[in-house]
Every structure is written in C-alpha cells, then in structure tokens.
Amino acid sequence: MSKKLTQSFDVIVIGAGPAGYSSAIRCAQLGLKTVCIDNWHDEQGRGSLGGTYLNAGCVASIALLESAKIYHSLNYRLKEHGIQAESVGVDIARMMQRKNTIVEALGRQIVDAFAQHKVVCIQAEAKLLNERLVEITPSDQSAVSILEAKHIILATGSSPIDLSCAPIDNEFIIDSSMALNLDAVPKRLAIIGGGVIGLELAGIWNRLGAETILLEAQETFLSMTDQQISREAYRIYTEQGLELRLGARVISAKKGSKKVTVEYQDNEGTHALRVDKLIVASGRKPNTENLADAEANLLLDENGYVHVDENSRTNLPGVYAIGDLTLLGPMIAHKGIEEGLFVAEQIAGIQNPINYGLLPSVIFTDPEIAWVGQTEQALRATGEPIKTAIYPLSATARAQAIGQTEGMVKIIAHAETDALLGVHIIGTQASEMIAEAVLAMEFSASSEDLARTIHAHPTLAKALHGAALALKSQK
Ligand code: NAD
C-alpha cells in the first residue's frame, strides 16, 4: 500500500473527546492551522465527535439519570405533592432515543465549532510515527496517508479495563458503555466496582426498578472522598435500596442459558449470586495500545500511561499528551479540557499553568457528590492544624421547599490562617454548588470571606454559607 505525505499543519490533535476538541478549537482560535483526527464511530459506522464523555459516558449517563429520577418521583413522590397519576410505565426505547438525540445534538455542536474555527476534521485511525509525522488510516483501510505538523497533541482518552474473571460477552456481561444502551430493565443486576462509574450506573438502573447489587473489592467506600461524606453517601444510597457489598472481590462470572452466576469472596468466604446482567465497571485504562509506532519511542509507564512533565510534554519534542492518557490529575473531563487549552496556549507562546490542586470532582449520582481541595483524612495525616464545620441541607429553606433535604456541606479551613483547604458537598445540585467553593479557593479566600459573602435566600448555596458561619462561630 502506498503512503504519501498529504498535508502539513501547525498542529495535529489525535482524539476528539473533551481534551482533544477543546484543544483543537483553541489552537485554531490562536491562528494555528489545525487538524483533529478521531476514530469513534457508531454501530452504523458513522463518525461521532465527543469521545467517551459524550457518546458513552457522562452526558449519556446524566441524561438517563434524569429520566430515571422522573420515573422514580412519579412512583414514590407524587403523593406528598398531592398529585395523582395512574399507571406510570417505562418505555426504555423512547428513553434511549431521548438520550441519543441529546448526544447527537451535542456532537453536531462540536462539528459546527470545528467548521466555524476551520479545524480540519478527519475520521480515521491515527498513529504517531515520530515527533513530526502521523499516519492516518480511514476505517475502510483505503488511502493510508501521512500528515506532518510542528506540534502533535495526543488525546485518545481511555477505555474500560477488561477483567479476566468476568469477560465481556456484550449480552449478559457488559461494560459501562453498553450499560447505557440496554433495551430493557434487568430484574436483577450486579455491578463490579463501587467507583464513580459503578455508582452512576447503579443510580440509573436501581431507580428504573432493577434490584441492584454493587460488589466492591475495597473495604472502604469511596476512599478518595472525604470519609464523613462517603459515610453519608453509603447511608443514603443504601436507604434508596442499593445493595452495597464492600470487601467483595469478584473472582468469576459464568454465563448460563439466561443468567450470570457471579462468584465473589469476602471475609466470610466465597459467595455466589445469580443475576440477569452483570456490568463490569472496574476502572479504565489509557488508550495507548496502537497510538505510536514502536520506532517513535514514545515513553509510556508500565500501565500504558504516557509519561509527561508538568507542562503535558512527552519525551518527544513537540509532542504533548493530555486528558485520560496521563497520570497528571484524575480521569475527569474538565481536567482534559483545561489541559487542552493549556497546551494550545503553550504552543502559541502563552503560559497559563493549571492549578491541579483545585480541580473539582463530581460524582453524578442522586444526590450528587462534589468536592474541591483536600479531605479531612488527608489533612489529619499531614498533621496540619485544621477546623471543620458541616451544615445539613435540611437546615435550608430551599431544600425543604423542594423536598431534597438529604446531604450536607462540609468546610475545612486552616485552624490558624482560616484559609479554605477543602469543601465537600453531598446533596442535590452539589455539582453546581461546588463552583462557588472552587472560585473562593482560586482567589485564596478564607472561611470568613465565605461567611461575609451575601448569599441569595432561600437557595441551596445557603448551606455553604451556613457551614462558613458555623466555622466562624467556633473562633
Ligand atoms: P474506579 O477505579 O474509580 O473504580 C473501580 C472499582 O472497581 C475500584 O474501587 C476497584 O476496587 C473495584 N474493582 C476492581 N476489580 C474488582 C473485582 N474483581 N471485584 C470487585 N471490585 C473490583 O473506576 P471507574 O469507576 O471505572 O472509573 C474510571 C475512571 O473514570 C475513574 O478515574 C473515574 O474517576 C473516571 N470517571 C469520572 C467521572 C466523573 O468525573 N463523574 C465519571 C466517569 C468516570
């Protein structure tokens, strides 16, 4: 097959997920001739921009959770509002169609933004040949060509880790992407992994009526979150009907004629579960398998993450890696977006470093969990003098009025300087409320600054204010 050098660009971006598309658009805005290559396609072979985040992750998950919440409210909350309705049912096909329509509309927005900014978009498989050259192969394997650029940005994202004890069969044993495309509500569902993805999926299917059992190998629930918040989350999710089995390591999953038998081990021995579906949500790995030719000598670590410095530069001059490909920060969409913008600006000679310490984290369950800064357990381990205060959402008039009183806001400040060190929220709209805390910490606010800031009343944000006032009264 002949390969020829077809075009030269200032920047080649490989991958059009949040990291890649935001980087490509920013490069173009800064006057750089940019091409973005992406290989995502649907079952019909149609290309779709936006990566996992849009096509098989966050957006799809949030869209389905919204439908599930409405269904659940109709079943369990109408009475308290004095509303009567008869025969509430679920049409999963229609629900999936709504989700797909949202995903397609957002995908078209990326296509339009590329067109508006004159980013060349190519649907193909890209492979890094060296620090200047990228080979591209269209899905029909025809016309392999070579593109050249002064700068190359790797943004190919991540994909689910396969568990050898529970091989995906795309029917009974499925991964997180397929779990967002089921055509019926399973009667009994097990999920391997009580991490962010496992919990987000559990919240959807449990609300739609599936008996849902989450099997998590770790003894500690949500070990990355503040433990006071994760205890509250455990209590709330369990009361909602989710069965959370901690310290439960799955060792095998076998498909029968219509069910899956899942075997797991805990302190008490080996147990078996029979379920209609099993979702594997045991973590994600960077998509670096075929990303670079061996002769390119791109440096990866033993788990396949691209080695980068604090400026997202790989070992190859002019080649950057961003988003889920690196261990610089967690696998979250907005980290990728920030790195995408940062690298684009770096190429254009602007240096706006990212404050990784203030990346907010969000778990899109119901209620949501969101946090920024450090946890109490991490700060106590360092011996830092701290003070903490919590404010329950139930103490705010807004939460009472909307009937969403579960959860709390927790503030951690330095005991001597009063500087905000961490804000942790569990409750409805936590993902929106955390923005105020991120901004406050970005501007090095103290807890007193928050306490002195006027908050509209009655709002959920008054819980943040309440927690700051509670800290103030400790002085
Ligand atoms: P994760 O690593 O957060 O959780 C996977 C869990 O599976 C772990 O707790 C692990 O102990 C458990 N596990 C592994 N093997 C097991 C076994 N055999 N039996 C029982 N439990 C087992 O991974 P994830 O939830 O798949 O998410 C992947 C990444 O994507 C994470 O970094 C996550 O933060 C990110 N993500 C973030 C968001 C968000 O920001 N809202 C959404 C989706 C994904």
Image: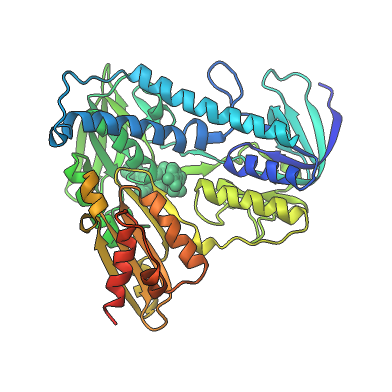
Point out the quarter of the image occupied by ligand 1: top left
Q: What colour scheme has been applied to the protein in the rendered image? A: rainbow
Q: Nearer the viewer, residue 351 or 44?
A: 351
Q: What residue is at 57 percent from the left and 29 percent from the top?
A: 107
Which of the 4 image quarters holds residue 40?
A: top right
Q: Judge left or right: residue 130 versus residue 374.
A: right
Up-down relation of residue 48 to residue 229 (above or below) = above
Q: Is residue 449 above or below residue 78?
A: below
Q: Is residue 262 left or right of residue 60?
A: left
Residue 268 visible:
yes
Q: Residue at x 65, y 60 (%)?
A: 309
Relative depth, front residue between 381 and 384: 384
Q: Residue at x 27, y 20 (%)?
A: 90
- The answer to whether 217 is drawn above or below residue 44 in the figure is below
Of the pair 245 and 419, the residue shown nearer to us: 419
Q: Nearer the viewer, residue 196 or 106?
A: 106
x 34%, y 36%: residue: 201
Q: Position of residue 368 (x, y in %)?
A: 33, 47
Of the 4 image quadrants, the one containing the C terminus is bottom left
The image position of residue 249, as x and y in percent, is: 29, 44
Q: Where's residue 188, x and y in %?
A: 22, 28
Would you identify the image quadrant in which residue 310 lies? Answer: bottom right
Location of the N terminus by quadrant is top right
Asked if 267 appears above or below 158 in the picture, the reply is: below
Can residue 38 be seen here?
Answer: no
